[in-house]
Image (cartoon, helix red, strand yellow):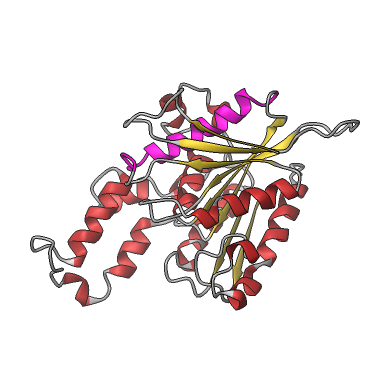
Amino acid sequence: MIIEQHALWGEETTPVYPATYTAYLADKLPNTTTGPRPAVIICGGGGFTHIAAHEQEPVAFEFLNRGFQAFTLDYVTSSTGDVSYPNPQADLAKMVATVRLNASEWNVDPEKVVAIGFSAGGFICASLATEWKSGPFAGLTGARPEDIRPDAAILCYPVIDFAYLRDQQTRDPRIDLRVPKTGGKTGRDLLNDFLSMVTGGEATDEHLARICPATNVSRNTPPTFVWCAADDKTAPAAQVYPFARRMAEEGVVHELHVFSEGAHGLSVANRNTESENVERQQAVHAWVDLAFDFLARQGIC
């Protein structure tokens, strides 16, 4: 196996383009007639401030073991640069185009490129899946829209609707209390500052709706698999249902699985991601086989 790390936008990273990726490439076995592999691009979560390691390499190995070439994307976060929409989405679009551009060298089938995102990474993947044709991402990468389109998307406990999350978090009146060491800002102020940073605009209903993946679902959205847990407080299942309904209305091939328990952040739910959460892992581990079955029905694996 070959493991390589590269800057995404050029030979080296820059403050404007800090994104990198790691390629996990299975060697071609001698005396075999197997063709190119499908590819997966992995966007871990981390609240847009960092990228969670347990949602990167363990996911790459899971897909490698299932016959994929795997790429973990270190998209821009608030700790590395300007995290505001559409910058992380542009990183993912660039990565999709890069995989297709290097398909022959990396033994990849360019018509079988999957994007998978966890939590915050799920928002990035959902944005590209719903806006690859209508959004700004192709222009930002200098690619054709069809070059940045994922052939399928897998969204794992995704952040989908910032307006819903804002409304849930501001229901408690304590959000309006001042927070120490913030110059007099309240919890509501801090939340709006965070939303403005991530979404690239004032956190108004209109702006949040405009960039919400549910708003942008169309018949051009690729096949999409979504899973989450009913007891997830970080990315509640309730914000996923309107997204699934819009896919149904537009005739998008999709599956939605809501497990009764599991909470948030379980990645591929195996020994490599275990952290005092064995029971919760067992509750959701079925998502892995379900997702690969879904991809197989789309002719991807």
x 56%, y 27%: residue: 98
Name the residue at 31% across, 62% down.
Answer: 166
Looking at the figure, which quarter contains the N terminus? Answer: top right
x and y percent of residue 94 in the render? Answer: 50, 30
Which residue is at the front of the view, 204 or 283? Answer: 283
Q: Residue extending furthest left?
A: 184
Quarter location, residue 219: top right
The C terminus sits in image quarter: top right
Name which residue lies at 47% across and 27% down: 138
Q: Is residue 132 visible?
A: no
- Magenta stretch contains residue 79: no
Which of these two is toward me, 97 or 8?
8
For residue 100: magenta? Answer: yes
Q: How many marks?
A: 0
| Quadrant of residue 177 within the rendered picture | bottom left
For the stretch drawn in magenta, what is the main secondary structure?
helix
List x then y, in percent, for residue 288.
68, 59
Residue 35 % position (x, y): 82, 31
Residue at the image position 64 percent from the left and 66 percent from the top: 271
Of 121 and 80, the residue lying toward us:
80
Q: Which residues are magenta?
A: 80-104
x then y, percent, for residue 211:
38, 45
Asked whether residue 299 appears in the rendered view, the answer is: yes
> In the rendered view, would you say 168 is above or below 223?
below
Q: In this rendering, is residue 137 above or below 152?
A: above
